[in-house]
Image (spheres, grey):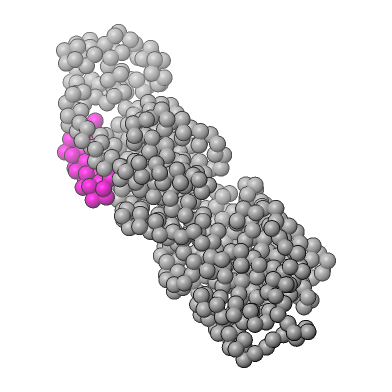
């Protein structure tokens, strides 16, 4: 609950003797220690020393801001807001309206991130009113524009968000406000990514991080930029950038051993990269280390739980995965597509399909849909819903073409390959799956590489390349075994491509369907109608059947089918 100004001023006890501050040598030493520790990033010492000085006599507004920021870095969000509130009123009493407005921005942002939207809006509105009344052109006007920009982002009005951020960039440049400039440049880049202007957006995101790595920015802004940039890169499927900036964030955190605020976010991002790189055990350890101090860490803890659920699912630890997803849900985390994929792994394709259908149906945002479409394709194929899988694979391909990220292109190629394989378009499947394999190898994602080798082996077997199929399966088996991917290993124990090929005489599932209809006396036109294919596609299947069975007519193909038990 927001307190009155009088309560703010009496919170520290207003330890004054008839209006005179109690200024002692001990207080001055504590203040000097606090300022020095803050400058070096020693947040615990800065907090303790500044708090001790404040206990002797209320700090001036500038030092109150230092105390508040030290509290923030230690994950003490409530004390951070209280300190900024006191600094806000102190600046007003001193007649420094712009500095007072700056405090309203940071108070509002903290409340907004905590989910207190109404009080946050109130503080933003107070800042706007104060600036309007003052009539002063100052950098703080740019900060308030970023508050409006956040609202436009929430409304998915990315063009308006971009324009507001661009104006804030101009203000930051004009007043030499580095923190404002860096944040606004990053937000402008994020908006461009959402608008599909990928190359421009990534250039701005990288530019904003130059200010971070060069040490130009205040600690809170540096932390926000690290975390936001990595999240933006991850959501845009820019794996290499996310990996590079996560390594930089790790070093930044290591230089501040008593920092709490951004540590949880760092751990989650590190765990995500470790999962991708195949370090599953270490990724689990990192995800479990996330603490709950501060709003950022509370959010990170739910992301860490989801990540734990995913790792348990991949290792076949289904009960542990279920529990991690359950707890993540109680903390506000959406656990799709992980939960749907868990149901699929448990042999419940109908439940999995219902869940992923609902999730995709509820998601209108283009990049948000891209996060769910690969799972939708996989589950729809497993459930026998080929048309549904085809539509999602085509949508994913369109997004990948627009976005251009290597990981997204790899995911799209894998989905297209799976659909082509199910359709019996083996040549198309080979091309798409080989593309996916090459892209995943370049990204250095061993599990995805191994997973791609499995349908690739099947496609090789379909065209009679049993040696190639065996090589792909053997390579996949080695990786699955090293990772501990038990469900994938168990699936490899199903009949091998050579066994399947011998049982079906090299025919794909679609070709078997066509052969059985041919044997029933159906024409190519009626087969096309029955299987919802073009007549040209059926012609191609019939030609492939003739070649694989070594026959030259429908009569001979029918006789072969009956002789070898294929009908």
Q: Position of residue 471 (x, y in %)?
A: 19, 42
Instruction: Residue at 70% x, 65% y: name it.
Output: 104
User: Is residue 206 highlighted in magenta?
Assistant: no
Instruction: Residue at 55% x, 36% y: name it.
Output: 362
Q: Position of residue 102 (x, y in %)?
A: 69, 68
Instruction: Residue at 45% x, 69% y: name it.
Output: 253
Range covered by the magenta-colored residues: 460-485
Compared across the picture, whether 258 is left or right of 437 comes to right
Residue at the top extreme? 521
- Pick the residue in front: 317 or 121: 317
Vertical position of residue 194 compared to residue 515: above or below: below
Q: Is residue 288 visible?
A: yes
Compared across the picture, whether 214 is left or right of 430 comes to right
Quadrant of the snapshot with the N terminus: bottom right
Which image quarter: residue 419?
Answer: top left
Quadrant of the snapshot with the C terminus: top left
Q: Position of residue 442 (x, y in %)?
A: 33, 53
Instruction: Residue at 22% x, 16% y: name it.
Output: 566
- Pick the residue in front: 58 or 350: 58
Q: Position of residue 46 (x, y in %)?
A: 55, 78
Q: Is residue 457 visible?
A: no
User: Is residue 468 highlighted in magenta?
Assistant: yes
Q: Main secondary structure of the magenta part?
A: helix
């Amino acid at each position: 609950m927001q307190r009155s100004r009088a309560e703010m001023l009496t919170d520290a006890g207003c330890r004054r003797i008839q209006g005179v501050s109690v200024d002692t040598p001990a207080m001055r030493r504590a203040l000097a220690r606090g300022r020095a520790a803050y400058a070096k990033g020693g947040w615990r010492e800065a907090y303790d020393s500044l708090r001790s000085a404040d206990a002797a006599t209320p700090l001036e507004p500038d030092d109150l801001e230092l105390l508040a920021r030290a509290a923030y870095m230690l994950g003490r969000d409530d004390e951070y807001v209280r300190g900024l509130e006191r600094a806000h009123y102190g600046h007003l009493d001193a007649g420094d309206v712009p500095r007072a407005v700056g405090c309203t921005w940071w108070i509002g942002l903290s409340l907004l991130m905590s989910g207190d939207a109404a009080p946050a809006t109130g503080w933003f509105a107070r800042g706007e009113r104060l600036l309007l009344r003052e009539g002063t052109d100052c950098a703080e006007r740019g900060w308030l524009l970023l508050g409006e920009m956040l609202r436009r982002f929430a409304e998915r009005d990315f063009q308006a968000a971009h324009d507001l951020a661009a104006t804030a960039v101009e203000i930051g440049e004009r007043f030499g406000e580095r923190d404002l400039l860096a944040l606004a440049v990053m937000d402008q880049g994020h908006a461009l990514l959402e608008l599909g202007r990928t190359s421009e957006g990534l250039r701005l995101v990288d530019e904003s991080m130059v200010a971070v790595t060069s040490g130009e920015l205040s600690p809170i802004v540096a932390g926000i930029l690290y975390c936001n940039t990595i999240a933006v890169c991850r959501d845009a499927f820019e794996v290499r950038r996310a990996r590079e900036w996560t390594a930089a964030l790790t070093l930044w955190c290591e230089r501040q051993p008593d920092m709490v605020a951004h540590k949880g976010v760092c751990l989650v991002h590190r765990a995500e990269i470790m999962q991708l790189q195949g370090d599953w055990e270490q990724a689990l350890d990192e995800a479990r280390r996330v603490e709950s101090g501060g709003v950022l860490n509370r959010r990170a803890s739910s992301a860490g739980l989801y990540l734990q659920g995913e790792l348990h699912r991949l290792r076949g630890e289904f009960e542990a995965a279920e529990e991690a997803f359950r707890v993540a849900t109680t903390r506000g985390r959406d656990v799709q597509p992980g939960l749907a994929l868990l149901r699929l792994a448990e042999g419940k394709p109908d439940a999995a399909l219902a869940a992923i259908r609902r999730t995709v149906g509820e998601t209108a945002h283009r990049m948000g849909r891209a996060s769910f479409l690969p799972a939708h394709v996989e589950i729809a194929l497993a459930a026998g819903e080929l048309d549904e899988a085809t539509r999602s694979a085509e949508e994913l391909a369109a997004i990948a073409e627009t976005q251009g990220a290597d990981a997204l292109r790899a995911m799209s190629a894998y989905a297209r390959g799976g659909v082509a394989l199910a359709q019996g378009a083996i040549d198309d499947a080979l091309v798409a799956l080989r593309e996916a394999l090459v892209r995943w190898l370049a990204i250095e994602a061993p599990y995805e590489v191994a997973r791609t080798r499995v349908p690739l082996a099947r496609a090789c077997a379909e065209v009679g390349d049993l040696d190639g199929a065996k090589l792909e399966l053997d390579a996949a088996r080695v990786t699955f075994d090293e990772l501990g991917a038990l469900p994938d290993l168990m699936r490899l124990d199903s009949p091998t491509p050579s066994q399947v090929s011998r049982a079906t005489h090299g025919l794909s599932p679609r070709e078997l369907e066509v052969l059985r209809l041919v044997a029933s006396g159906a024409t190519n036109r009626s087969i096309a109608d029955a299987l919802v294919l073009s007549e040209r596609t059926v012609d191609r299947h019939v030609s492939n059947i003739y070649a694989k069975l070594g026959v030259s007519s429908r009569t001979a193909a029918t006789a072969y089918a009956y002789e070898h038990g294929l009908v």
